[in-house]
Amino acid sequence: MSIPLAALEDIIDRSGAAQRIEALLPRGARGRQLTVRTLLLGMLMALADDRPAHLTRVHAALIALGPADQARLDVIADWKTGPHQLTYRQVEHTHRLMIRALRNKHPGGAPSEDLQAACDQLLEASIPAAHKDTSSALAADWTDTETWSRPPRHGTTTCADPEAAWGHRNSNLPGPKGEMFFGYYLSAVTMVAEETGPAVPELARRMTVCSCHLDPARALVPVLLAMAAAGSPLGDIIDDSGYAHRDAEAWAIPLRHAGAQLVQDLHPHDRGPRGTCHGAIIANGNLYCPSAPPALLQLGPLPPGATPEQTAAHDHADGYHRVTCPAAAGKIRCPLRPQSMTLSRDRPEILTPPEHPPACCAQQTITIPPGIAAKTRQKHDYPSAAWRHSYTRRTASERTFSTIKDPATATIARGWCRTMGLTPLTLWIACLLAVRNQRILDAYNARQQDTARRAAAGLPPRTRKRRRTSLAQLTAGP
């Protein structure tokens, strides 16, 4: 096991999840040999050894401990007949009681409050105190998680996992770009560096699982709001167009009320001009001069692999984006703003101002209702250079999912967890992300020590090697 046993026990003890779950379990006349704390420890140990989420692996990890640890964790207990070692049936029994206590009393495809709280406690405890407040920026994303159950047969609606549903997932590999799967959506937020701050370990802060018939964006909002209420303030929330295209009441508005600032890619249907407000053109979440060139308002993000020349031209054109009147800001010459006509001739000039000036041209300031561009409004002008540099941090969420989907280690593909249902799958994935956080911390600390050692020797920091051949080119063949 690459992660020390003491580190895994410390996560469970600091989280308080074991005590929370143990209080929910029924009290029988005959005491259980296996406690929830030891069961959670066995789950973490099995995942730390890159084993699948099987109860047989949990039992094998616990009985493989040394005699002192087995006695301390009650894996070996004193019975009337002598020392008794934990059996698989006892592991299965405690796991069944735990899942029964954590599951939703009225299944609807979302985790219960007790289950979500236990997962939040485990993930928060997997982050050292030194890194809890290093950054409040989070990258959000969701991915697919298949269930072990087979989907309902044609013409029926019943199966072994009634909360699972059909969902859609995209693929960047050669071939079809999308396919259907039967299971759940896994949502997670990963801690990333601030825009001008130092590098931080990309640790998973929160996660949740929901059925595919529910909206994963709406399912993640209560988790983030609970995180802010628990004392972890929300900073930048970086997300793609899958989140930005939701209704404002479902994603943008509640997060802004919680103190978050959105940095998001806009859906093609939300880009460009979208009406006016007091004469100002609403485009890409901001207000612009009514005489702004149409090509400027239709400016979109740079395509992947853009050349430096294309990037420079894009950023130069985007330099005219202004939230306030550009003439009042001294950026252009406009006859409707006499003071701007004193600017030098090298500034752009509005040759055909509106015949009947709207409020944005006649007044010094205008009051914008909060409902204007509520869905598309964000921290930086879209798609400016500042937005692009900030949005690149979103790839941290994709790296989070890639580490738990790597076939060389632990992959959450179908068959990884053969205990069917939303509750066991959610709890197992929370444990997997907690283990993954420990590996990310070890790699981050090793890089920091190597950088300090090279700096003391007068050497520059190591640079990461970039792949010069894409995966599509490698799989294309000759």
Image (tube, helix red, strand yellow):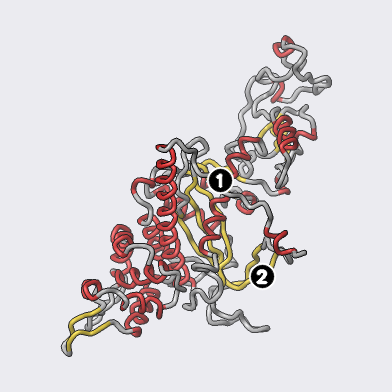
The answer to which of 209 and 249 lies nearer the viewer is 209
The answer to whether residue 257 shows anywhere in this view is: no
Q: Quadrant of the N terminus?
A: bottom left
Quadrant of the rendered image containing residue 476:
bottom right
Q: Mark 2 points at which residue?
A: 180
Mark 2, other Cα within 10 Å: few <14 / some 14–19 / many ≥20: few
Q: Residue furthest front?
A: 457
**Residue shown at 83% from the left, 21% from the top:** 352
In the figure, 290 relative to 348: above or below? below
Judging by the rendered image, the residue that carries numbered circle 1 is 393
In the image, is 349 to the left or to the right of 453?
right
Q: Which mark is residue 105?
A: none
- Local crowd at mark 1 within 10 Å, few (<14), some, or many (≥20)? many
In what element is the residue under mark 1?
helix
Which residue shows up at 74% across the image and 33% down it?
313
Give the residue type at disc 1. Arg
Residue 48 lies in what quarter of the image?
bottom left
- Mark nearer the N terminus (1 vs 2): 2
Percent of width and height locating residue 71: 21, 75
Amino acid type, label 2: Met
Image location of residue 129, percent across then percent down:
34, 48
**How many marks on residues?**
2
338 is higher (above) or lower (below) than 158: above
Horizontally, residue 408 falls left or right of residue 59, namely right
Left/right of residue 382 with respect to residue 101 in the rendered view: right
Query: Can you tell which of label 1 and label 2 is closer to the viewer?
Result: 1
Judging depth in this view, the residue of 60 and 89 nearest the camera is 60
Q: Please tell me whether residue 139 is drawn above or below residue 48 in the rendered image.
A: above
